[in-house]
Image (spheres, rainbow, N blue to C red):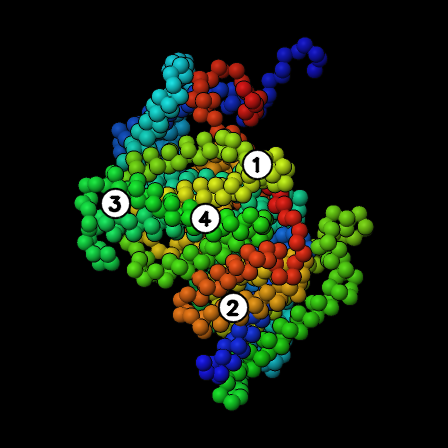
């Protein structure tokens, strides 16, 4: 290399793919996936008859391939023809058009552009899940997992604690929301007849979730106050003790079913509701971590004494972080209870803790992208590897151990989530690697 | 309250405390020496139990078939020895594969790795033995002593005696031997130890091996007292040992044992006084209270724990 040379082109498949897709903005990807989903909707049935598949593969063919190896060529063909090829072609070749749209949207307020993209995303989800109920519940649980993972990332990632209390927060939120909706809106043998009519659902479901979040936030005080004096290992124990306490408390709450659990939640956690709540949660939490308070969280993590010396009120920061994270965990718990329409204390034990910790550490600490990645990956893997039965519980932990060894902070740790950059049109120059400051 | 019931519960508390103490002992050794939460420890305890089950069943079958007639006491001793050795191999493998690559990584990553290794161990045992409960062969004929209305079985006495002996033995090992001195040095200042020519990897391996062997003994004793085995029995003991190790304080192995006994006592006496469904609630509230007032544990030194991210 001599001074004055233009930078060498990177070689290799990854670089080539990067160059191929570089001009595609988010709008392009959304339109491409929308095309694929519409394609599946309209020619799906005909295609599966032609390929000899029993029904439309629900999770991009992975389940079919694992259950019946004979159908591997057929499902690969289906996924290729319906998803991979259309998405690639539409994304790349409508790039000029979609870049134009993205540039036009960029001139409008961010909210308008964001809402249009979110609307498209919702349309994609709606059409995709129309095909089967399994897809619907998988997607709902995945969205809820994103919310939970982001809420625990606030405490474990941005503030650097090791908190094992999240199942407790979810449980509190789930129970409060369930008691609210079941008690007031359904004829139930535990609480008696409905007090209000179910038509009031759209107004009262958010209220129920909000109450669940508030109860969880109050519970977070029990973990936050001891955290003023302790950090690290001792906080882990305190949060663990909190989790056991909540579980035991709920098991003894006879008026809410005790260990048998509470069922009969009204069917209010529809896809639009879950989607709106999760998007709202991600947006609010992203704003929180990019605000001054979010920087305070990082300061408390990196060096508490220095932060205190720099006028950061560490007690207030810890308290706010715990309560805010717990609030969203409670909201996610409430959603979870209403999606499954059953909630029991046993769900919120050590298994749930392992699951939640896996998602946040796999995806990446201190990063909204990381939370989304971790939640989506672990949920999808968990579902997709189901036919492997017991092997699934060897594959997923092994994968996590590998990630921990090679990327100890997670796959996408510390990656910034900047809506403006995400929605911006792509100029088409090949990027070198991760985001540099614009 | 009936004195008999009180003393009976005291004996139960001693027994449970012994289990928690031995498991916490192994946990706390790794924690003090390597600054590491080994969340797989409970599952190592469970593996020790299953290995003991396999060895004992094998030896009993051998005896029964007439090839090699072994008296029951010999089978018990061989089971304990074999289980200790094989479980310490498992512990060494866990250390080599899971924790050594993460020695410089943030501790949270090592903790997650531990959790995952635990899941792999559980799944492995589930795959080998299936989901149905296994019955550990009764290697000690149960003899119940009736002391003035209080019933004590020989198994309970054996458990408490073995635990106390193990604790004293470990204490002497750490205090008197060179290996023990190396372990104390690593607990004191991890960075300086390799500069002094001490082979850190060897000591780490030894710590894990000892801890796992102790867990195996605890496992066999547990199986003698409660013979029904299932692959998920180790989880709750692992997490309780975690609580006991931290309650005892970092750097203090005896502290972890004493904290294990305290945990056992709190649990049993809470169940005795209050309705037993509230046991976890009250026991953990008490522990929360202790930690709020003595955040660095009962016997640990106060130190500023900056959890590296």
Q: Quadrant of the N terminus of chain A?
A: top right
- Same chain, marks 2 and 4? no
Residue drawn at 62 percent across, 66 percent down: B257
In the displayed structure, would residue B211 be above or below residue A275? below
**Residue to which mark 4 is pinned:** A220
Residue at image coords 58%, 40%: A301
Q: Is residue A378 above or below residue B261?
A: above
Say which mark, if any, is on residue A312. Answer: 1
Discs 2/3, front: 2
Give the mark nearer the N terminus: 1 vs 3: 3
Depth check, front residue: A44 or A242: A242
Q: Spatial distance from mark 2 to mark 3, Cα to Cα?
A: 43 Å
Q: CA distance from mark 4 to mark 3?
A: 28 Å
B14 or B161: nearer the eye?
A: B14
Label 1: element kind: loop
**Which label is found at residue B266?**
2
Residue B192's tag is none
Q: Are marks 1 and 4 on the same chain?
A: yes
Quarter of the image holding residue B139? Answer: bottom right
| Real-space CA distance between mark 2 and mark 1, rounded to the nearest whole angstrom | 39 Å
Q: For the residues tagged 2 and 1, is the chain the same?
A: no
- State the SS at label 4: helix
Q: Left of B91 or right of it: where is A224?
A: left
Q: Nearer the viewer, mark 1 or mark 3?
A: 1
Q: Is residue B32 left or right of residue B227?
A: right
Frontmost of labels 4 and 3 is: 4
């Amino acid at each position: 290399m001599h001074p004055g040379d233009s930078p060498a082109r990177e070689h290799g498949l990854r670089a080539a793919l990067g160059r191929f897709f570089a001009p595609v903005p988010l709008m392009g990807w959304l339109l491409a996936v929308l095309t694929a989903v519409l394609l599946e909707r309209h020619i799906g049935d005909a295609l599966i008859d032609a390929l000899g598949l029993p029904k439309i593969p629900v999770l991009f063919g992975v389940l079919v391939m694992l259950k019946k190896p004979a159908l591997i060529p057929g499902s690969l063909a289906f996924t290729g023809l319906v998803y991979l090829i259309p998405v690639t072609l539409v994304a790349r070749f409508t790039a000029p058009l979609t870049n134009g749209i993205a540039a036009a949207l960029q001139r409008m307020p961010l909210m308008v552009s964001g809402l249009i993209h979110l609307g498209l995303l919702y349309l994609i989800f709606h059409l995709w899940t129309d095909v089967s109920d399994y897809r619907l519940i998988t997607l709902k649980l995945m969205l809820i997992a994103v919310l939970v993972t982001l809420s625990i990332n606030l405490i474990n990632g941005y503030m650097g604690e090791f908190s094992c209390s999240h199942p407790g927060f979810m449980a509190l939120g789930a129970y409060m929301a369930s008691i609210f909706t079941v008690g007031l809106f359904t004829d139930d043998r535990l609480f008696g007849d409905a007090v209000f009519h179910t038509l009031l659902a759209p107004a009262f479901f958010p209220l129920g979730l909000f109450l669940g979040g508030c109860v969880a936030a109050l519970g977070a005080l029990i973990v936050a106050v001891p955290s003023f004096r302790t950090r690290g290992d001792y906080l882990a124990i305190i949060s663990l003790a909190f989790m056991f306490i909540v579980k035991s408390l709920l098991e003894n709450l006879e008026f809410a079913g005790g260990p048998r659990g509470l069922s009969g939640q009204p069917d209010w956690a529809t896809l639009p509701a879950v989607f709106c709540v999760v998007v709202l949660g991600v947006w609010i939490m992203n704003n929180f971590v990019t605000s001054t308070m979010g920087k305070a969280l990082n300061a408390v993590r990196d060096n508490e004494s220095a932060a205190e010396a720099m006028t950061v009120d560490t007690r207030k920061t810890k308290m706010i972080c715990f309560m805010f994270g717990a609030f969203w965990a409670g909201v996610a718990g409430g959603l979870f209870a209403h999606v499954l329409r059953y909630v029991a204390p046993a769900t919120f034990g050590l298994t749930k803790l392992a699951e939640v910790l896996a998602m946040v550490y796999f995806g990446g600490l201190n990063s909204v992208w990381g939370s989304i990645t971790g939640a989506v990956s672990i949920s999808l893997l968990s579902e997709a590897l189901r036919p492997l039965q017991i092997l699934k519980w060897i594959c997923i932990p092994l994968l996590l151990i590998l990630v921990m060894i090679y990327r100890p902070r997670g796959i996408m740790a510390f990656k910034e989530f900047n809506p403006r950059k995400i929605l911006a049109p792509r100029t088409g120059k090949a990027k070198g690697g991760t985001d540099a400051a614009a | 309250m009936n004195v008999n019931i009180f003393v009976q519960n005291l004996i139960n508390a001693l027994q449970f405390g012994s289990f928690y103490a031995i498991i916490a002992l192994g946990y706390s050794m790794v924690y003090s020496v390597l600054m590491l939460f080994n969340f797989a420890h409970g599952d190592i305890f469970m593996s020790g139990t299953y290995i003991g089950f396999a060895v004992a069943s094998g030896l009993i079958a051998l005896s029964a078939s007439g090839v090699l007639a072994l008296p029951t006491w010999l089978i018990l001793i061989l089971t304990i020895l074999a289980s200790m050795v094989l479980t310490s191999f498992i512990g060494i493998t866990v250390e080599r594969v899971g924790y050594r690559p993460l020695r410089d990584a943030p501790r949270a990553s090592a903790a997650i790795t531990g959790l995952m290794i635990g899941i792999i161990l559980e799944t492995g045992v589930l795959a080998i033995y299936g989901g149905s409960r296994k019955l550990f062969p009764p290697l000690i004929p149960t003899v119940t002593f009736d002391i003035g209305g209080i019933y004590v079985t020989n198994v309970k006495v054996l458990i408490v005696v073995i635990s106390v002996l193990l604790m004293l033995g470990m204490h002497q090992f750490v205090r008197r031997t060179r290996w023990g001195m190396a372990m104390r040095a690593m607990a004191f200042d991890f960075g300086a130890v390799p500069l002094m020519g001490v082979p850190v990897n060897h000591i780490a391996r030894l710590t894990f091996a000892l801890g796992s062997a102790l867990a195996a003994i605890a496992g066999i004793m547990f199986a003698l007292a409660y013979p029904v085995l299932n692959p998920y029995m180790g989880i709750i003991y692992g997490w309780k040992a975690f609580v006991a190790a931290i309650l005892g304080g970092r750097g203090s192995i005896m502290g972890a044992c004493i904290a294990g006994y305290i945990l056992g006592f709190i649990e049993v006496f809470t169940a005795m006084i209050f309705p037993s469904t509230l046991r976890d609630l009250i026991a953990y509230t008490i522990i929360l209270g202790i930690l709020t007032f003595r955040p660095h544990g009962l016997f640990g030194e106060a130190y500023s724990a900056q959890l590296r991210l």
